[in-house]
Image: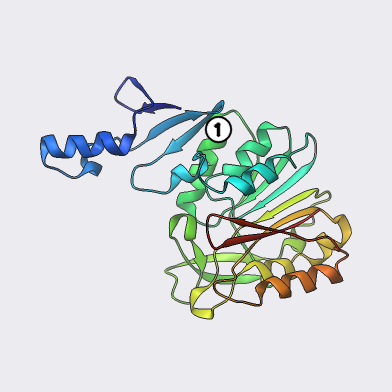
Amino acid sequence: MRIKLAGFGFVIREIPVVLMALTIERIFAGSPGDYLPKAITVEREGLTWLWRPRTDDYLAFSAKHEPSVTKLLTTQFRKGEVFLDIGSHVGRYAVRASREGMKVHAWEPNPYNRYGLVQNLKMNNLRAKVHTEALGDTDGFVLFQNRGGRSHVTKSGKSKVQMRRLDGFDIPEVDLVKIDTPGALERHEGFELPILAGAKRTLRTHHPRLLVELHRHLAEDSTEECRDLLKTLGYSEFTYITDMGRRAYLFCP
């Protein structure tokens, strides 16, 4: 891994940035955030990533994040096909798919995450259609809580974002879909089911390969509800993946 500290004018190899910040804190008796630059550029596996201190931007390039999902999903990246990345965060999968020659649509309603997504694409000279809306089963506006990789629709949210059904985008070709959106905690349910409900026509028409995060810790029956809905849309094969503890995913080839 290669780390460049923007504004410092040099490159550090294989030195954890957090450890460096803690060392500086001991020397200067300040907060690590006071001494870290506003932007850190990380180069890994032939890709360049933005890392803003004290954020979860590192999830884009960390080898320890979703290892099973990453291994599975990247084997599904095929040049010329269309990939829908729903809940793109800062582009862990959108960037990799674009590098493999896929036509990428990425949805990220959190403006801070979306900036990271756009910058990660730009730094690697890659392209994707970036959408600002949240996806669900209705069209309108919803309240949204911006919390990095755990941003979610919630009644107590402090910002308002537009919600649309995936079917409303009328994307002419769809080959691969990834849905990874945090659940609504106060409603004790995941948001994967409303997104699937708003994508019925798209899924039935194109029958894309599908990977969905399941919020079983919020709703025990989310797995069965998603599977039953997908059966009505023509899906018959289901593979369950457990990654990083309690996080579970449903893959439909």
| Residue ranking furthest to the bottom | 187
In this view, 159 is above or below 120: below
Disc 1: which residue:
122
Q: Position of residue 105 (x, y in %)?
A: 68, 47
Q: Position of residue 34 (x, y in %)?
A: 21, 41
Q: Nearer the viewer, residue 146 or 253?
A: 253
Q: Quadrant of residue 26?
A: top left
Q: Residue at x 60, y 28 (%)?
A: 125
In this view, 217 is above or below 180: below
Q: Quadrant of residue 5?
A: top left
For badge 1, the amino acid type reads: Lys
In this view, 81 is above or below 15: below
Q: Residues within 10 Å of mark 1 (few under 14, many from 20)?
A: some
Q: Residue at x 73, y 53 (%)?
A: 177
Left or right: where 236 falls relative to 60: right
Q: Position of residue 12 (x, y in %)?
A: 35, 23
**Secondary structure category for the residue under label 1:** helix
| Residue ranking furthest to the top | 10
> How many marks on residues?
1
Q: Residue at x 68, y 40 (%)?
A: 74
Left or right: where 232 falls relative to 212: right
| Colour scheme of the rendered structure | rainbow
Q: Position of residue 122 (x, y in %)?
A: 55, 32
